[in-house]
Amino acid sequence: MKQPVVRNIDFSVLNKQSIESIHEKSLHLMEKTGMRIVGERSVVLLKKHGVVFDGDIGHIPPKLVEESLKAAPKELKLYTRDGAEAMTITATGRQCYFGTHADQLQFVDPFEHIVRPFKKADIKTMCKTASATDNIFFVLSVGLTADVNPKIQTQSTFIETLRNFDKTVNFSSNDIESLQDCIDIASDFAGGLNELQKKPFIFNYCEPIPPLMHPTESTEKLYISAQNRIPVVYMPYCMMGGTSPLSRVASLVQCNAEALTGLVLTQLVSEGAPFIYGAMPSIMDMKTMIGSYAAPEFHLNIAAMADLVDYYGLPFYGTAGCSDAKTLDVQAAAELSQQIFSTVLSKANLIHDVGVLDHCNSVSPEAVLLASEIMDSCKTYALGVDMSEENLGTDLIESVGHGGNYLTEDHTLENYMSIWYPSYFSRKMDNPDKSEVLELIQKKMRWIADEYESPAPDKEAVKALDLWEKKILA
């Protein structure tokens, strides 16, 4: 894997006063309006720690939020499937790591050039693409394969992902029971839960239901993750005008209150359990009634939430590299570029949904490759200007003098590789009349399919997966 994006440019959407105001309004919302919280053991636990319930509406005191913010780890380390350190996020860190999907509802087939239902065999294609792409650090295993029994989709996809992907696995589950199965599968793969906890190569993804609702499925998934001390993302998907107010700041307040509720529950279940704060404050398009994945308001809001979560010192899970377009076209390329540039400048840490199209109905491996090219470009931009004395170069300028050139200078030979050179974008002296970008991406896809092999897990780990596969198919 390449190095992650390292930000050396200071950028923010919110200032400290704005952040503190949103925080105070969120605490007010959590205490006075409260959250609808369902799930017997979660409710019992919250009541035990001072949350007053009016029916199923829990009123969370600010003190509990502040204690939870202090208890949650400010550093997160995630590992590869084989135990190598892959991602480190700290309160003062400036790195961001991108990830794509292992599966989705539909697949933008890079060889047949059609959009069709996602099948189990496509998991291998997505995993190989992500493994072969240096800027992709994790995949999200969702459990949406059309040709697998829905009752075991989560477990089946998770097993297939572990077989074919050698980096970090983010996963979600279709129900509560399958979440524990996935943790048990990963534990057996790692050689025990203790080993998995020492070097977590998985992290869970779950959501509340805006506005202000935390059903049993959400609270139980948080509970199980915290109980097993597996890193968990809690990510409200607020659509402005639909499931949150059509006001940017009001949506940020609501989204923050919902995410902080997940943090409180996680820390009450197991103090110090790893928690990843997620937020998707997008818009509902009033013309089409879709929740847009490429709206400029969405990605501005993500950058704003990243400022807020950086203030808390927590890891932040964002979204970028996706499009509302059906296929990889001009619209998709433009939307991918804007989002990746925005998120690289922001304070987001883990960035999912790379290559997701059609407002999260499909995933395109070709879009993942294009996004990686854009990431490389933005990564160079994010380095900023190095003001060290050795880089000022006044002696060199004086040496070359008026009207000279730097082409034959040793300094140029020593530093020419510090420039970014694209893999797909053209800088030819004589450009062809037709773009070659898609042709080059398709050529890379064919190489991945025909020649690239993801590193295989060790034999004992494969045996563990085989046993689980037999169990879920029984």
Image (cartoon, rainbow, N blue to C red):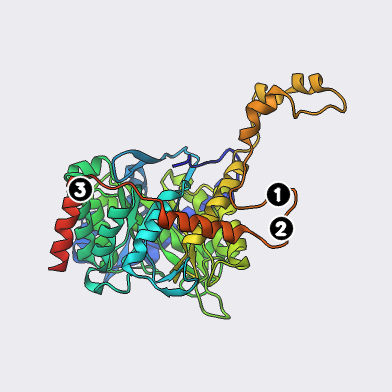
- Please say if the residues under marks 1 and 2 sit with CB atoms less than 8 Å apart: yes
Q: Give the class, few, some or many, for how many residues have Cα within 10 Å of label 2's Cα (few <14, many ≥20).
A: few
Quarter of the image with the N terminus is top left
Measured from the top left, where is residue 461 in percent x and y? 20, 48
Which of the two residues, 361 or 118, is positioned nearer the viewer here?
Answer: 118
Which of the two marks, 3 or 1, is nearer to us in this view? Answer: 1
In the structure shown, which secondary structural element does the residue marked by tag 3 occupy? helix
Among numbered discs 2 and 3, the one appearing first in the sequence:
2
Residue ID at (67%, 52%): 426
Measured from the top left, where is residue 39 in percent x and y? 23, 66
Which of the two marks, 2 or 3, is nearer to us in this view? Answer: 2
In the structure shown, which secondary structural element does the residue marked by tag 2 occupy? loop
Query: Quick check: 195 left or right of 115?
Result: left
User: What amino acid type is highlighted by mark number 2?
Assistant: Pro
Give the Cα separation between the discs numbered 2 and 3. Answer: 49 Å
User: What amino acid type is highlighted by mark number 3?
Assistant: Ala
User: What amino acid type is highlighted by mark number 1?
Assistant: Lys
Query: Which residue is outermost to the right?
Result: 402
- Please say if the residues under marks 2 and 3 sit with CB atoms less than 8 Å apart: no
Give the Cα separation between the discs numbered 3 and 1. Answer: 47 Å
- Numbered circle sitting on residue 240: none
Measured from the top left, where is residue 299 in percent x and y? 55, 59
Among numbered discs 3 and 1, the one appearing first in the sequence:
1
Task: Please name the residue that numbered disc 3 is placed on.
Answer: 461
- Numbered circle sitting on residue 432: 2
Residue ID at (39%, 61%): 258
Total labels drawn: 3
Which of the two residues, 434 or 102, is positioned nearer the viewer here?
Answer: 434
Task: Please name the residue that numbered disc 1 is placed on.
Answer: 428
Q: Give the class, few, some or many, for how many residues have Cα within 10 Å of label 1's Cα (few <14, many ≥20).
A: few
